[in-house]
């Protein structure tokens, strides 16, 4: 025990000696002061260490060094910087002669003196990055490159690098509150029984463009709204023979189905997109642009005369004041087509352009935008409240938020003032709400339905198919097993029109268990890997492949996803287990 106590005592003595030898007071932080005063007649010394972080530097500034005229031999300050051989010495001389010291390594400051020897100095540290033009400084003293400011990732401890980053619509004062109030007003006009009556499609579009749709956590109210839309669309389709749907009605229905992640190409057996294309042929020129915008949103090709129709509207010298509304829709349609690579904004001097897609020169497109901007009034409006909303949507669709030749801020404020007034109505709210979320009708195309795919396929496809309305047709579905068709199974099915291969396979599976199959969702496709208990075999090189045609001689191989392939009357669908070739 005595030995242990002796060892502990020895270690304490050694530690104290080390403290006396290297007993400098450590200073941390980006800035601070070092102050000291010797008050007795003995010669003494005291030291401080300042740690300099990597990629940083510290500036030292001597504020005061005084003594009782003992001179530099007995009163001085020595500064030593890591990785530098020299020792910088300050004596009691005029402060004006003491230049600041810049250090990129750890600093040791030693004060030597006796009675009435005083020391005062300050230090400030900074990240080297802070010296670069445009760098952003956090409150901790750390600096960030411009590329990391307003990038959606908080780098500063307090998130200062992401504050005040809103641009465009979101930089307008009180825009978030305005959007919430308008959404509340819209929902207050909603009826559990009738929805928004004939405006139900518009109400749904406004609601989903102003707020992100969460298909995995929908409220009961949202589910009811979507179900009311389905009922309204189906009722209108059933009356179509006696009360034909107009192109405008079809456009509104299609847009609403798209934002609710329902397929307008195959809605309970009806192809609304085809109906719209048929209606375009007999509708007036003034109503075609909104139909073309809708077709673009539905990722559908436009009729061959679409280019000339859109150009005629833009070039029209009609004095109708509402022409501006239609021209704004043309800009939205062109913006949508441009984002989907279905518009060729070729150089007007390029005579080699012979593309079959919608062809406009950049000058035509830009002129159309400029013509819209020129009519903006001092109060931010472009005419009445509805025209103002449509034109603002058009300019947003053309990525003109940051353009300086029109005033987005005033336009949005003007629209919000109307929404807060007693004269607010449904149409103004429908047109304005998307703007308050930085969107337009052309954003319908970008609706994210990735979370809806599994939900759709996990339902009861047999009930869904049997409940489909509209005309029926007959198709054949076969299984070929072996390269030489060693085994063939065929079933004939009477099914609704506009049915997919996946639906046919599910119907066959229920009708006869030999057609039972297994699949997996992979990216954007359904991967069929087992049918009739025969699994894809990579060692034998045999896999299930899809073939389509009307008869054996006309069948062709298809690599499309089975849930994306719509079959026609008399079609023959074949799943063939055979060797695959790349």
Image (tube, grey):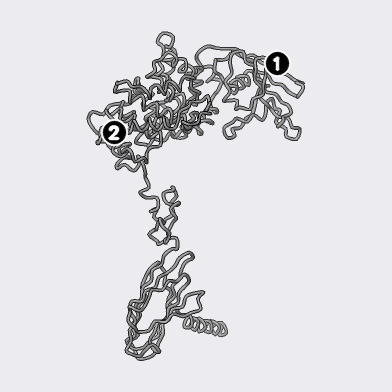
Label 2 residue SS: loop
- Front in this rendered view, residue 278 or 35: 278
- Front in this rendered view, residue 129 or 465: 129
- Does the CB distance between marks 1 and 2 fall below 8 Å? no
Seen from this angle, which residue lies furthest top? 242
State the residue position of label 2.
Answer: 376
Quadrant of the drawing holding the C terminus: top right
- Position in image of residue 386 (x %, y %): 30, 27
Of pointers 1 and 2, the one earlier in the residue sequence: 2
Q: Is residue 394 above or below residue 38?
A: above
Instruction: Report the side of 383 relative to 170 (left or right).
Output: left
> Residue 553, labelled with which disc?
1
Quarter occupied by residue 422: top left
- Position in image of residue 334 (x %, y %): 43, 29
Label 1 residue SS: helix
Instruction: Report the side of 455 relative to 34 (left or right).
Output: right
Instruction: Report the side of 40 relative to 146 (left or right).
Output: left
Mark 2 burial class by Cα count in 10 Å: few <14, some 14-19, many 20+: some
- Position in image of residue 101 (x %, y %): 41, 73
Q: Is residue 415 above or below residue 273?
A: below
Q: Nearer the viewer, mark 1 or mark 2?
A: 2
Q: Is residue 550 above or below residue 402?
A: above
Q: Residue at x 42, y 82 (%)?
A: 89
- Position in image of residue 33 (x %, y %): 36, 73
Quarter occupied by residue 478: top right
């Amino acid at each position: 025990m005595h030995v242990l106590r002796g060892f502990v005592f020895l270690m304490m003595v050694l530690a104290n000696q080390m403290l006396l030898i290297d007993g400098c007071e450590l200073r941390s932080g980006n800035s601070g002061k070092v102050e000291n005063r010797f008050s007795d007649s003995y010669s003494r010394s005291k030291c401080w260490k300042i740690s300099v972080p990597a990629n940083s530097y510290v500036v030292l500034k001597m504020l005061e060094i005084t003594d009782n005229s003992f001179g530099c031999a007995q009163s001085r300050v020595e500064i030593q910087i890591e990785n530098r051989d020299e020792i910088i010495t300050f004596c009691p001389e005029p402060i004006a002669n003491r230049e600041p010291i810049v250090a990129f390594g750890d600093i040791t400051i030693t004060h030597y003196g006796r009675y009435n020897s005083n020391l005062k100095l300050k230090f400030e540290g900074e990240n080297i990055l802070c010296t670069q033009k445009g760098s952003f400084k956090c409150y901790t003293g750390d600096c960030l490159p411009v590329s990391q400011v307003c990038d959606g990732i908080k780098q500063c401890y307090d998130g200062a690098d992401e504050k005040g980053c809103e641009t465009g619509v979101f930089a307008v004062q009180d825009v978030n509150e305005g959007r919430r109030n308008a959404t509340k007003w819209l929902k207050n006009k909603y009826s559990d029984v009738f929805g928004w009556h004939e405006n139900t499609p518009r109400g749904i579009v406004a609601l989903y463009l102003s707020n992100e749709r969460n298909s995995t956590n929908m409220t009961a109210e949202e589910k009811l709204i979507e179900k009311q839309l389905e009922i309204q669309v189906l009722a209108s389709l059933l009356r179509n023979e006696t009360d034909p749907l107009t192109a405008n009605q079809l456009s509104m229905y299609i847009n609403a189905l798209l934002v609710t992640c329902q397929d307008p190409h195959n809605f309970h057996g009806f192809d609304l997109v085809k109906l719209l294309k048929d209606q375009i042929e007999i509708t007036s020129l003034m109503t075609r642009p909104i139909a073309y915008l809708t077709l673009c949103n539905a990722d559908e090709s436009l009729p061959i005369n679409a280019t000339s129709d859109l150009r005629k509207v833009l070039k029209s010298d009609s004095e109708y004041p509402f022409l501006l509304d239609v021209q704004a829709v043309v800009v939205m349609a062109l913006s949508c087509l441009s984002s989907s690579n279905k518009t060729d904004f070729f150089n007007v001097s390029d005579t080699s352009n012979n593309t079959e897609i919608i062809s406009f020169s950049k000058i035509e497109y830009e002129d159309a935008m400029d013509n819209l901007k020129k009519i903006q009034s001092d109060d931010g409006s472009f005419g009445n409240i509805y025209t103002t909303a449509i034109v603002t949507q058009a300019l947003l669709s053309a990525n003109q938020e940051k353009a300086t030749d029109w005033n987005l801020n005033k336009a949005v404020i003007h629209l919000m003032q109307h929404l807060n007034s007693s004269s607010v109505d449904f149409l103004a709210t429908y047109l304005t709400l998307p703007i308050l979320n930085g969107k337009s009708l052309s954003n319908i195309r970008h609706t994210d339905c990735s979370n809806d795919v599994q939900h759709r396929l996990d339902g009861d496809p047999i009930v869904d198919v049997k409940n489909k309305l509209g005309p029926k047709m007959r198709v054949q579905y076969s299984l070929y097993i072996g390269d030489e068709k060693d085994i063939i199974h065929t079933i004939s099915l009477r099914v609704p029109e506009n049915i997919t291969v996946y639906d046919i396979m599910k119907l066959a599976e229920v009708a006869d268990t030999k057609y039972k199959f297994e699949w997996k969702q992979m990216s954007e496709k359904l991967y069929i890997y087992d049918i009739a208990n025969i699994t894809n075999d990579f060692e034998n090189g045999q896999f299930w492949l899809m073939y389509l045609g009307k008869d054996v001689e006309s069948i062709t191989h298809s690599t499309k996803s089975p849930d994306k392939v719509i079959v026609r009357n008399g079609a023959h669908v074949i799943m063939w287990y055979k060797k695959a070739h790349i």
